Image (cartoon, grey):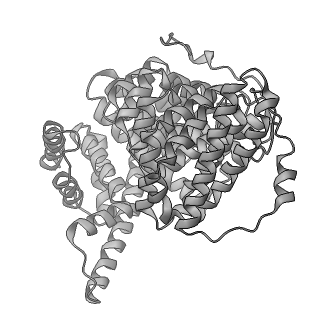
């Protein structure tokens, strides 16, 4: 992957056909020919023939399993050192080691014993095998770690799980897993299954210890591997999983968002989603992958520097192209634009310059393409995104010809967009009122809620969208355009409302602006809202 990003025209995101026929990776392999020369193809038959009864898991059994594993490992190391060029001499010890690793999987049935396993010191031995010359053995260990850290296994066992994952990390499990990942190829079915298991194990680690999300990016080259994988044109199960892991790594870490931006991640994700600008995914799994890619892109657009990269890479143009094609990614493109344009005027300016208003306002008026998803909720989500997008445009374009073009949209066709805005205002206002009335009924039943909880519940009911609509009305009113003001006055009167109703919504918004972006940004935001309140 190139370290430097070249300037790209939106037409560079080509649209060639690609093969989606490749099936998801098979179940983890039971055998393959190892690069150490050992063929483990008869292991399953061997294990079945033995069929020893499973022992009840207690501390004595745990110690017995660990001791047997350590003995087989020691024997294998000794055989390989003694006969480095004669695989047939250490073949038996390799098979026996494989058997002991498989037996260790019984430990997943007793996560309460994980601290004891750590105390016995066997974690170092287990993780060392991730670097074994025989990749079959390394893959066996991946399977073991995946089982031991499985979400279902660790349910209600948070503390033992933490102890195990901490020990694995201390013994370089993350580094060794990602190194092994780099040795695998999707062209080999067994290795493809191993890739899936490695990604699943990393996800399990993050589930147990969320800080692993940043740790794995800091210590390994996982991000580079994931970016390379999502740019492959052919769809497969591992590409889908790579997109999911990428979204997980980015969803709550500004450190990872910035790091990925520095690694040309914005450009890589734009290339990945561009494959779907004029065609739809062919399967539900592929559809999920595309949603993961857009989730990752939206997370990536949180830091300011990545918004800048998005604009330079002509991401605004690509999203408008996707919207114009009216395919499955239509709503995702609106979401990405919303993230890119929030608190970033250059993206808003670019949007206006490349005819984005012509694309966005028909959608704002409710002219949306059909979707297979839940139509009502899908439509509501798009409405909320479009309101946010229009609010961002007004916040990012304060003067000049672009501002005039934006305002003219609310005058054309008999001010129909102000009518639409008031329609949305009434709908979201009624929803919030219903939620507030529900609070009152709950309090009558002695189920009290504090003010913060009430406010959050109202936000969930649509208050934030209502607040943004009020902000847009504030921008429109302060434009001092006579036709705009007259229309707003008329519509408020028709709905038996006054400007005071809008002021009340703006005041609540003003009073609840947080300082997440710093005290100066909070003060700037409150000053803007106060100007609207004073002007109305």
Quarter of image, res 105: bottom right
**On-image quarter of the N terminus:** top right
Is the residue 105 above or below the residue 432 in the image?
above
Q: Nearer the viewer, residue 136 or 454?
A: 136
- Whether residue 78 appears in this view of the structure is yes
Name the residue at 76% across, 48% down.
27
The x, y position of residue 246, in whole percent, is 52, 37
Name the residue at 68% across, 55% down.
103
In the shown orientation, is residue 529 left or right of residue 14? left
Name the residue at 48% across, 18% down.
313
Is the residue 67 above or below the residue 240 in the image?
below
The x, y position of residue 127, in whole percent, is 54, 40
The x, y position of residue 31, in whole percent, is 81, 41
The x, y position of residue 499, in whole percent, is 21, 57
Is the residue 138 above or below the residue 122 in the image?
above
- Whether residue 409 appears in this view of the structure is no
In the shown orientation, is residue 401 left or right of residue 530? right
Q: Nearer the viewer, residue 273 or 489?
A: 273
């Amino acid at each position: 992957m190139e370290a430097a990003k070249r300037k790209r025209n939106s037409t560079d995101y080509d649209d060639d056909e690609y093969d989606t026929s490749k099936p998801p990776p098979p179940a983890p392999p039971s055998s393959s020919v190892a690069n150490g020369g050992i063929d483990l193809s008869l292991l399953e038959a061997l294990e079945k023939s033995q069929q020893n009864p499973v022992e009840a898991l207690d501390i004595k059994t745990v110690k017995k399993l660990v001791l047997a594993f350590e003995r087989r490992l020691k024997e294998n190391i000794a055989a390989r050192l003694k006969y480095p060029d004669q695989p047939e001499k250490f073949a038996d010890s390799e098979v026996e080691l494989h058997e002991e690793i498989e037996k260790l999987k019984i430990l997943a049935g007793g996560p309460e014993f994980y601290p004891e396993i750590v105390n016995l010191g066997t974690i170092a031995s287990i993780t060392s095998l991730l670097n074994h010359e025989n990749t079959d053995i390394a893959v066996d260990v991946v399977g073991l770690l995946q089982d031991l850290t499985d979400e279902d296994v660790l349910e209600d066992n948070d503390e033992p799980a933490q102890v195990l994952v901490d020990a694995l990390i201390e013994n370089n499990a993350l580094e060794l897993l990602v190194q092994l990942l780099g040795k695998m190829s999707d062209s080999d079915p067994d290795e493809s299954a191993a890739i899936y298991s490695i990604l699943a194990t990393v996800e399990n680690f993050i589930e147990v210890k969320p800080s692993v999300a940043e740790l794995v990016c800091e210590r390994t080259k996982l991000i580079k591997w994931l970016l390379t994988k999502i740019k492959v044109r052919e769809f497969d199960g591992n590409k889908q999983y790579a997109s999911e892991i990428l979204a997980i790594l980015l969803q709550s870490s500004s450190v990872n968002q910035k790091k990925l931006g520095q690694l040309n991640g914005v450009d890589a994700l734009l290339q990945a989603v561009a494959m779907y600008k004029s065609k739809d995914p062919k399967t539900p799994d592929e559809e999920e992958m595309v949603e993961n890619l857009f989730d990752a892109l939206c997370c990536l657009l949180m830091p300011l520097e990545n918004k800048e990269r998005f604009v330079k890479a002509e991401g605004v143009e690509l999203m408008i192209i996707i919207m114009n094609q009216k395919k499955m990614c239509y709503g995702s493109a609106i979401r990405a634009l919303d993230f890119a344009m929030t608190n970033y005027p250059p993206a808003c300016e670019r949007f206006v310059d490349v005819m984005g208003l012509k694309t966005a306002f028909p959608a704002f008026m409710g002219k949306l393409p059909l979707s297979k998803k839940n139509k009502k909720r899908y439509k509501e989500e798009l409405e909320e995104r479009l309101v946010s997008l229009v609010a961002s445009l007004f916040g990012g374009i304060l003067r000049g010809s672009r501002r005039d073009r934006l305002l003219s949209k609310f005058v054309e066709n008999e001010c129909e967009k102000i009518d639409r805005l008031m329609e949305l205002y009434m709908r979201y206002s009624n929803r919030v009122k219903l939620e507030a009335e529900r609070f009152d009924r709950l309090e009558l039943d002695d189920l009290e809620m504090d003010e913060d909880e009430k406010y959050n519940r109202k936000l969930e009911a649509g208050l934030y969208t209502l607040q943004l609509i009020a902000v847009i009305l504030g921008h429109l009113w302060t434009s001092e355009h006579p036709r705009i003001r007259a229309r707003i006055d008329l519509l408020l009167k028709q709905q038996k409302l006054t400007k005071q109703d809008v002021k009340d919504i703006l005041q609540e918004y003003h009073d609840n602006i947080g300082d997440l972006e710093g005290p100066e940004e909070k003060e700037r935001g409150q000053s803007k809202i106060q100007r609207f309140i004073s002007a109305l």
